[in-house]
Image: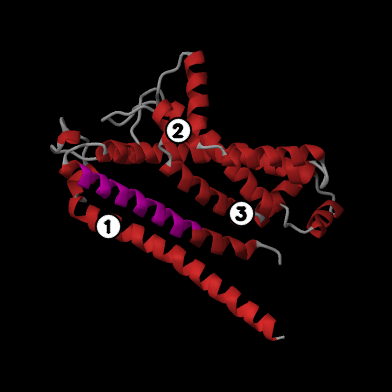
């Protein structure tokens, strides 16, 4: 009995230390970025395009990178949702619980989930060369969509598998078709959809290796899908590579802005998740 008490105390201490480590690491990252970046974070930097010699310490801003990141994230998230939701429905409603096809599909998604973004970028770059496409907004959207589809599928799939079989039986007993059952299940897994969207946005907006090959970089705002586009992660990378201290300080300001965007989206995602749970049948 005494050993069980000691074991429980040790487990509690380890959990507290692990939580403190994660919170402390997050606080350190925020403090370092904020301490270095806030002095350089000005309205001009956020609201203006890079001027001539911006990466040499002259005037200008990163508005092109901000809009470019939002365009890639928005379009890729929308594309990922459109492609992923039917996959989740097919795995959980149209295929049986012990289906080998479903098992293989989940295994493939797990493998794709762990592949580094640089591999996706190299793959998409090869396809673009074969098709004669140049680095553009479209290329960035394609590679980012491929990157986040496994996140969407596995996150929503885990929530969909928790839906009680009694619900399916109740829906089918009312004479509903499988397509109509999908609508009912969608309401039950909406919190999972919100969580998957949040995770996907977090990875998409922070990806630099994939879009480095496919999106290119420009000081202008893209006017079409065929134009090259700048992103915040690449802007931070190029500024940190500069030998000029003022430019490196602006890189921390851009990193702080990127962190604030992710934090804002996280808060919004949590609010949506909490509100969406009201529609779930417990």
Residue 78 in picture, x, y percent from top left: 52, 39
Q: Which mark is residue 210?
A: 2
Residue 213 in picture, x, y percent from top left: 42, 26
Relative to 167, 150 lies left or right: left
The residue at which mark 3 appears reads as 192
Mark 3 / mark 2, whichever is N-terminal: 3
Kindly report which numbered mark, 3 or 2, lies closer to the viewer in this rendering.
2
Residue found at the very far front of the displayed protein: 3
Q: CA distance from mark 2 to mark 1?
A: 27 Å
Residue 216 in picture, x, y percent from top left: 36, 27
Q: Give the vertical position of 79 relative to 177 (above or below).
A: above
Mark 2 / mark 1, whichever is N-terminal: 1
The residue at which mark 1 appears reads as 34
Determine if the magenta segment contains residue 134: no
Q: Nearer the viewer, residue 177 or 215?
A: 215
Q: Secondary structure at mark 2?
A: helix
Q: Which mark is residue 115?
A: none
Q: What secondary structure is the stretch in magenta mostly built from?
A: helix
Mark 1 / mark 3, whichever is N-terminal: 1
- Over which residues does the magenta segment extend? 248-269
């Amino acid at each position: 009995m005494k050993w069980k008490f000691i074991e429980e105390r040790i487990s509690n201490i380890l959990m507290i230390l692990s939580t403190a480590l994660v919170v402390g690491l997050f606080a350190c990252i925020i403090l370092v970025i904020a301490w270095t970046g806030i002095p350089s974070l000005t309205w001009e930097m956020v609201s203006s395009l890079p001027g001539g010699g911006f990466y040499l310490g002259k005037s200008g801003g990163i508005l092109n990178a901000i809009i470019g990141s939002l365009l890639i994230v928005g379009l890729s998230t929308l594309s990922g949702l459109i492609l992923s939701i039917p996959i989740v429905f097919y795995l959980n409603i149209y295929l049986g619980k012990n289906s080998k096809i479903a098992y293989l599909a989940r295994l493939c998604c797990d493998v794709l989930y762990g592949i580094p973004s640089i591999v996706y970028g190299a793959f998409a770059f090869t396809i673009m060369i074969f098709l004669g496409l140049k680095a553009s907004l479209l290329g960035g959207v394609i590679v980012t969509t491929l990157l986040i589809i496994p996140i969407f599928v596995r996150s929503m799939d885990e929530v969909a598998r928790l839906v009680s079989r009694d619900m399916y039986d109740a829906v089918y007993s009312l004479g509903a078709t499988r397509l109509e059952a999908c609508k009912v299940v969608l309401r039950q897994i909406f919190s999972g959809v919100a969580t998957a969207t949040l995770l996907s946005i977090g990875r998409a907006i922070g990806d630099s290796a994939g879009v480095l090959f496919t999106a290119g970089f420009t000081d202008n705002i893209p006017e079409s899908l065929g134009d090259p586009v700048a992103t915040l992660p690449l802007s931070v990378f190029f500024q940190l590579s500069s030998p000029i201290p003022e430019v490196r300080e602006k890189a921390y300001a851009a990193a702080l802005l990127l962190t604030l965007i992710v934090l804002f989206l996280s808060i919004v995602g949590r609010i949506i998740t909490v509100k969406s749970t009201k529609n779930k049948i417990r």
